[in-house]
Amino acid sequence: MKLEHYASITQGAFLSRIQTSHSLDAVKLPVYTMREMNEWLSPDPNVSLENQQDVHVSRDRLGLLPIAKEGLVLISLTGQRAVALKQEHVGKLIPSNFAIIEPSVVLHPDYLEWYINEHPDCKRQLKIATQGTIVSALSIQMLRTLEIILPPMNVQVKIGNIHRLLHRKKRLLQEKLMLEQQYVKHIMMGYLKEELK
């Protein structure tokens, strides 16, 4: 079945077309970036969101803009990676380099993230869709026609949970390794200081 049968798929906002406003009624919106997506998907626990990009938008235009909310799935149109948005992402403006997928009640966001990022059939489809182009970018229409396997919801939830837990385990292992390295460095510096006395 095609993804469009189970979700609505749109493109994020073109930042150059957003009229920024510095009036008193303007709202400051953080922008969801590729860097944030990469940090979220990375097993590295040192997530730093320095230099957050913001735009100021008139309050009356807020309803017209694609704003991140929990349960949406974003796909990088150039990186071909997906992320199911969580509470940490809520309220951010989604720019045009992302496709926004709003799953229906029969499609679990975490399962969709796993399916797009890890399932070999999906990876093959995405690779074929971008072959022969100068810039390997996905189109919204291609995503709408993406063939997906849709198991029962309880299976989707299991797969999504396993995927999330595995990601969390990778982050914790990376954090453990980093802490061990810091500890060993501290011990070695202590030995060196003892020798210099």
Image (tube, rainbow, N blue to C red):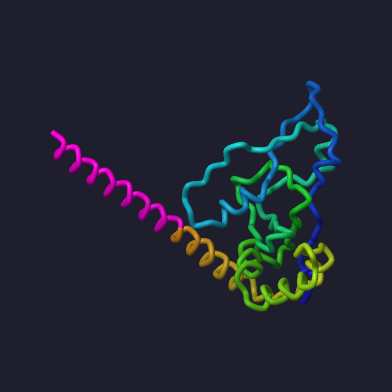
Q: Nearer the viewer, residue 156 or 121?
A: 121
Q: Farthest front residue?
A: 196
**Relative to 165, is 190 on the left or the right?**
left
Tell me what residue is drawn at x 81 percent, y 63 percent.
139
What secondary structure is the magenta-colored segment mainly?
helix
Query: What x and y, as percent, mark residue 141?
Result: 84, 66
Tell me the quarter of the picture where residue 109 sits: bottom right
Height in image: 113 above or below 188?
A: below
Residue 30 shows up from this direction: yes
Image quarter where the N terminus lies is bottom right
Tell me what residue is drawn at x 14 percent, y 40 percent.
195
Tell me the quarter of the picture where residue 19 sits: top right
Q: How many numbered tags mark residues here?
A: 0
Residue 4 shows up from this direction: no
Image quarter where the C terminus lies is top left
Q: Residue 97 lies in magenta, yes or no?
A: no
Height in image: 43 above or below 18?
A: below
Q: Farthest top residue?
A: 24
What span is colored magenta in the figure?
171-197
Q: Residue 180 lies in magenta, yes or no?
A: yes
Query: What x and y, as percent, mark residue 81?
Result: 66, 62
**Relative to 189, is 128 on the left or the right?**
right
Tell me the quarter of the picture where residue 171 sits: bottom left
Query: What x and y, as percent, mark residue 18?
Result: 84, 39
Tell me what residue is drawn at x 74 percent, y 47 percent.
94
Query: What x and y, as percent, mark residue 67?
Result: 74, 45
Q: Nearer the viewer, residue 163 or 173?
A: 173
Tell me what residue is drawn at x 20 percent, y 41 percent.
192
